[in-house]
Amino acid sequence: MTVKDLMEMVDRLHPNQFSSTDKLAWLNQVEQTIFHDVLMTHRDAPVDVAPVYDDATSTEELLAEDPWSRLYPLWMNAQIAYYNHESMQYDTAAQAFNSAYDDYWRAYNRAHLPVGRVNHLHLTDRRWGYGAANL
């Protein structure tokens, strides 16, 4: 999903009075969260810095790829409801976003090796204190 696709979808599914600047700020917030909490906790992060979007017509791809990109319109819907002071709609939208975000996080974690994960133990490696003298 691109920035432009998201902005068009949000305005079509959740008509609102907010400017594209507001919506881009919300998008940048969730992208920062994904970058720091999901991608940077793994060895093979696809980007080195979190993207910052400043053009609502950008064709840049968002960090969470399909099918996980469904979290973006859910996030935007939650923000629209929050700033419209629609607490019941916000609660529902926030729960839906949290569920989608958790699904994305779990799927990414299954597919990518986290930083600091030990995938084998060297029992004869002296640096671990288990050398031949200790056996």
Image (cartoon, rainbow, N blue to C red):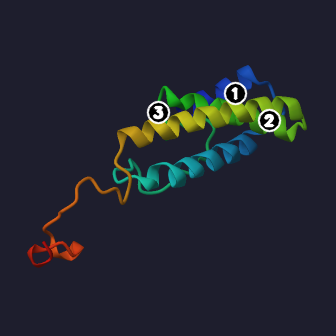
| Disc 1 from disc 3: Cα separation | 17 Å
Looking at the image, which residue sits at the far bottom?
133
Q: Across the whole image, how many numbered discs are drawn on residues?
A: 3
Looking at the image, which residue sits at the far left?
132
Cβ–Cβ under 8 Å for marks 1 and 2? yes
The type of residue carrying mark 3 is Glu
The type of residue carrying mark 2 is Ile
Q: Position of residue 84 (x, y in %)?
A: 88, 36
Q: Which residue is mark 3?
A: 65
The type of residue carrying mark 1 is Val
**Can you tell which quarter of the image residue 90 is in?**
top right
**Dot 3: within a 10 Å radius of its alpha carbon, few (fewer than 14), some, or many (20 or more) residues?**
few
In this rendering, the label closer to the viewer, 1 or 3: 3
Q: Position of residue 44 (x, y in %)?
A: 34, 50
| Front one among 73 and 133 | 133
Cβ–Cβ under 8 Å for marks 2 and 3? no
Q: Which badge, 2 or 3, comes first in the chain's sequence?
A: 3
Q: Position of residue 50 (x, y in %)?
A: 51, 53
Residue 31 tag number: none
Q: Is residue 95 left or right of residue 104?
A: right
Residue at (17% x, 64% y) in the render: 123
Q: Which badge, 1 or 3, comes first in the chain's sequence?
A: 1
The answer, for residue 59, to whether it is visible in the render is: no
Q: Which badge, 1 or 2, comes first in the chain's sequence?
A: 1
Residue 80 tag number: 2
In this rendering, the label closer to the viewer, 1 or 2: 2
Element at label 3: loop
